[in-house]
Amino acid sequence: MSNIGGMLTPLGDPPLFLGHLQGVPFTWTFRLWPHWALQVVVLLALYFVWDTRQYTREPIAALRRDRTQIEPLRLRGALNVLCLGLVVLAVAFLREPWREAGIVVLAAVSLWRTPRAVRRANGFTAYPIAEVAVLFFGIFLTMIPALELLRQRGGELGVREPAQFFWASGILSSFLDNAPTYLVFLALGQGLGLGSEVVDVPHAILAAISVGAVSMGANSYIGNAPNFMVKSIAEEQGVQMPSFFGYMLYSGAVLMPLFAIVTVVFFR
């Protein structure tokens, strides 16, 4: 859900941000709202049904506690809302190095001004961030030969139609991380000379690459760095998570039929 929910702006998912750095206009991703809406509605509906079913299986004591122990909804650390808004503006309107410098400054302000009690209440630690950084540093190093081979020989795959770009970029994004995979298929699309509507590719091809990389990055823990970070945060809080292939059984059962529908509706 988090992967697909980030499809509307370059800030929402790493591949789209890299596309923005390659010249894709910041607002171009707004045209992906039909692809986003279809998937989000289906996933939210499935989640509601699943969560309702699981909630009815909670112990009686837990259900009683939900009804009696009510804490009013409050917002603490509200300065971070302003910082987040400024990050969005920095990405949309600033160029390097001012963009990166501004984001670093805003992160420092957040760390400085947010009360420590708020972070303690959220169980915040730097461990998941460090673990993901180390893991994906290794992934990026080992995936370079595979991506270079794809960059040099990708034209031999016969990928030319939007549906082909959607599935090819998506499947590789599931295992090679979706951000660099997006760039490889963008370069492949540019090299085929199919059109030059946006960054030297047709709108339909760029949409297929974008939706494939973003959506299918949810297929595995390593398809997108935040996936593994969520796993790490949950396990640090004592929540048991599925194994690597156990997660893929869940994701495949839910997402593969959804991606087939997306193909028929948008990319056939």
Image: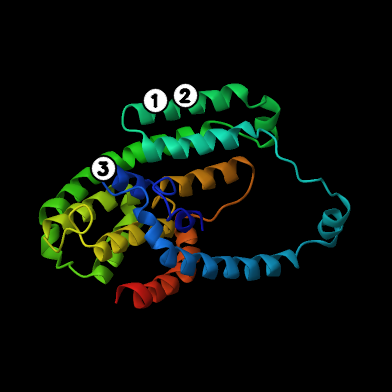
Is residue 184 in sight in this rendering? yes
Give the residue at x 25% y 49%.
183
Residue 222 appears left or right of 74? left
Q: Nearer the viewer, residue 93 or 21?
A: 93
Is residue 177 in sight in this rendering? no
- Check the picture and name the quadrant holding the C terminus: bottom left
**Dot 3 amino acid type:** Thr
Q: Residue 163: horizontal and vertical position, in percent? A: 27, 71
Task: Tell me the crowding category of disc 1: few under 14, some 14 to 19, or many 20 or more residues within 10 angstroms, Cα based.
Answer: few
Mark closer to the chain start, 1 or 3: 1
Q: Which residue is mark 3?
A: 142
Q: How far separated are the C-alphas under marks 1 and 3?
A: 29 Å
Q: How far separated are the C-alphas under marks 2 and 3?
A: 32 Å
Residue 211 appears left or right of 121? left
Q: Residue 43: horizontal and vertical position, in percent? A: 53, 66
Q: Residue 171: horizontal and vertical position, in percent? A: 32, 62
Q: Residue 177: horizontal and vertical position, in percent? A: 34, 49
Task: Tell me the crowding category of disc 3: few under 14, some 14 to 19, or many 20 or more residues within 10 angstroms, Cα based.
Answer: few
Q: Is residue 228 above or below residue 5?
A: above
Residue 265 appears left or right of 68? left
**Dot 2 amino acid type:** Val
Mark closer to the chain start, 2 or 3: 2
Q: Which residue is mark 1?
A: 101
**Dot 1 amino acid type:** Ala
Q: Which residue is mark 2?
A: 105
Are dots 1 and 2 in contact, CB under 8 Å? yes
Q: Nearer the viewer, residue 177 or 111?
A: 111
